[in-house]
């Protein structure tokens, strides 16, 4: 087991780690939104062919589709 003081010397300080952790978090969110976009299928995404879908649009479409699916059960 390593000495805690050595680990602190190796580990970057919190203010240096925070931007890295935040970037990883944003990357995870963006990847999940892209997966949702792919799962929605082209017929749903073609409702707005001339405009780029925002992340909020993709999330709203997903919620709507899930609600419809749950009501059919």
Image: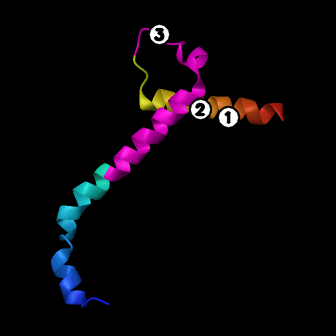
Q: Quick one: label 3 or label 1, which is nearer the N terminus?
A: 3
Q: Quick one: label 2 or label 3, which is nearer the N terminus?
A: 3
Q: CA distance from mark 2 to mark 1?
A: 6 Å
Q: CA distance from mark 2 to mark 3?
A: 17 Å
Residue at (51, 35) in percent of width and height: 35
Name the residue that disc number 2 marks. 62
Residue at (37, 51) in percent of width and height: 25
Where does the magenta region start and end?
A: 24-51
In which image quadrant can residue 21 be found?
Answer: bottom left
The N terminus sits in image quarter: bottom left
Residue 56 rendering spot, x and y as whole percentages: 46, 31
| Residue closer to the observer: 38 or 56 | 38
Dominant secondary structure (helix, strand or loop) of the stretch shown in magenta: helix
Label pair 2/1, CB-CB below 8 angstroms: yes
Q: Is residue 41 above or below residue 20?
A: above
Q: Secondary structure at mark 1?
A: helix
| Residue closer to the observer: 44 or 39 | 39
Q: Is residue 62 above or below residue 27?
A: above
């Amino acid at each position: 087991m390593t000495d805690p003081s050595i680990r602190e010397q190796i580990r970057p300080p919190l203010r240096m780690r925070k931007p890295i952790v935040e970037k990883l978090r944003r990357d995870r969110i963006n990847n999940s939104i892209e997966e949702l976009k792919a799962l929605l299928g082209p017929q749903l995404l073609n409702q707005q062919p001339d405009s780029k879908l925002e992340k909020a649009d993709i999330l709203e479409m997903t919620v709507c589709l899930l609600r419809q699916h749950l009501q059919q059960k």
